Image (cartoon, coloured by chain):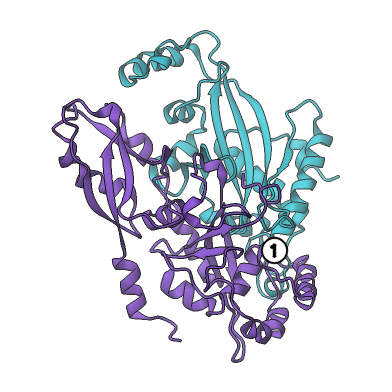
Chain colours: A purple, B cyan
Amino acid sequence: MEVFSEEAAKYVWGGAIPLQIRLHESEVTTLPPPPPALVLGSRIGYLPLLVPLIKPYFSSTLPPGEDTVWFDYNGLPLKWYVPIGVLFDLLSAEPERPWNLTAAYVINGNCKNIMNMAQADQFDLWQSLVKGRIPVRLYIRNVGESLEDLEDAPIIDSWDRISYINRAVEIHKEGGNYMTLKHAMRTLLPEIFGDEDPDNRYELREEGSHEAGSSFGDPETISMTRNDLVEETSFGSQRSSEANLIRIQGIEPDLNIPFSWVVNNLKNPDYFLHLCVFLRTSSCQAKAT
Amino acid sequence: MQSETSARQWDGTLSPNDFNSSVAALCERWKEVNDSLPQWLWVPFPVVGDSSCNAAGYLTMENVYHQNASEEVSHEESILGDEELSDDATLVQSCGKDDMHVYDYHIVYSFNFRVPVLYFRGYRLDGCPLKLEDIEKDLPAYSLKGLRESKWTFMTQEDHPYLRRPWYTLHPCGTSDWMKVLFGSNAANNQPRPLHYLSAWLSVVGQAVGLRIPLGLYKSQ
């Protein structure tokens, strides 16, 4: 596989979610209510960037004045600093197209207060990359053990039900071996992506003991186990109803592909790899707070 | 200690495990130095699927009173506030004689920068959160200067990584560099003991936000 594929990058950068945005009913001052706005939201873009696009649709019904817009999906206010593609992958478990969002206006609000919230995250990258660490943002959503169809996933009514964390994965390249996505997932979430196979359990413990010194994995341990990893069957490529599911840029990748390919081709322009994980564990085990 | 970095120059960062030890050391020393001060407390926040990660959580010190807010300033604030705010709830706030500012400080480990990061929020005694303008008045002059000069890389408002509410934070992008400077030339080849890292870090960061640090923290034990 190529390290960087222009085609993949084109898909990622050109990717967009069809959005159907309705005005929140409390904002509607005219009859009939204005029709919904149909716009494309760039996967790597952010919701506030759509505000100027949708304003003309609703201007007839909105009172004049400065306004702040926020969006929600099924009543959940959408975080403005989470890329649109990630919001969609995470919250619309079974992809809904067009994706139905609601826009609410805060009239006379001061936009600055919201916009002032820092998006200094991208600075994270430079430091991390220089040191060979890949910044990853994990969004973990528990869909429950018994769920058969993602369509029936419970509606997320609060961000407290999603665990989203920044982490870093160290990439080591030695010999002809490569680190797979599965291995990266193991360093990120060892209790979920560790294997049932007792040999692998042992290997994980090995890594854990190295961890006492350095933070993530030891190059030697990784290179010893890497061949085994490549042999293993993937559980991400097929949607089995028991498997945990990973989604990156709308793709549910095979866990045996090289992690470096994933990073090079699927990262966002903020240099973070945004990675959604749908867990199928019993809820007591995975309290996503 | 990190095998890769100690061979070369220390890069000013801290591994998750060292952060954890440093947290314990700071809590202990802080208590030793002054029992009557608000204390640091570690709140673990285990992550689904990685409960062994002991750097996940935050070190918290809450209800720290800031005493410099004068009555005159608060009066001006309330007038300004009336003009700006449309929220009824804030119009009835009783700014005035007891305009005490209370701060909560959290220290969080950044897995990307591998350094501690300070998060804080301020509020009045009645729980009303302080706006940036209010907080600015409590900051030392040199921090205000920093804030004006580098708007996005010094102090900003962000979601608290565990509590998911907007908190103010000091951006960690320069931390590892000035930590190297702080530990001086001795640190070039030897990584300093992680136990000292957090208290040294706090001596700089605390000053930036006006948090008073007991001198005893730095006296040799």
B117 versus A132 height, above or below: above
Residue B79: x and y, percent? 36, 13
Give the total number of marks visible in the rendering.
1
Determine whether, in the image, residue B194 is placed left or right of residue A116: right
Residue A64: x and y, percent? 17, 27
Determine whether, in the image, residue B50 is placed left or right of residue B134: right
Residue A29: x and y, percent? 20, 25
The quadrant the C terminus of chain A occupies is top right
A199 versus B220 height, above or below: below
For the residue pair A52 and A33, the one nearer the viewer reads as: A33
Q: Circle 1 sits on which residue?
A: B187
A84 versus B59 height, above or below: below
Determine whether, in the image, residue B141 is placed left or right of residue A210: left
The chain that hosts pointer 1 is B
For the residue pair A251 and B139, the one nearer the viewer reads as: A251
Residue drawn at the location 35% of the way across and 18% of the way down: B80
A19 versus B36 height, above or below: below
Q: Secondary structure at mark 1?
A: helix
Residue B3: x and y, percent? 73, 73
Residue type indicated by callout 1 = Ala
Residue drawn at the location 60% of the way across and 71% of the way down: A184
Residue drawn at the location 67% of the way across and 75% of the way down: B8
**Residue at the far left in the pictured view:** A60
Residue A175's image quarter? Answer: bottom right
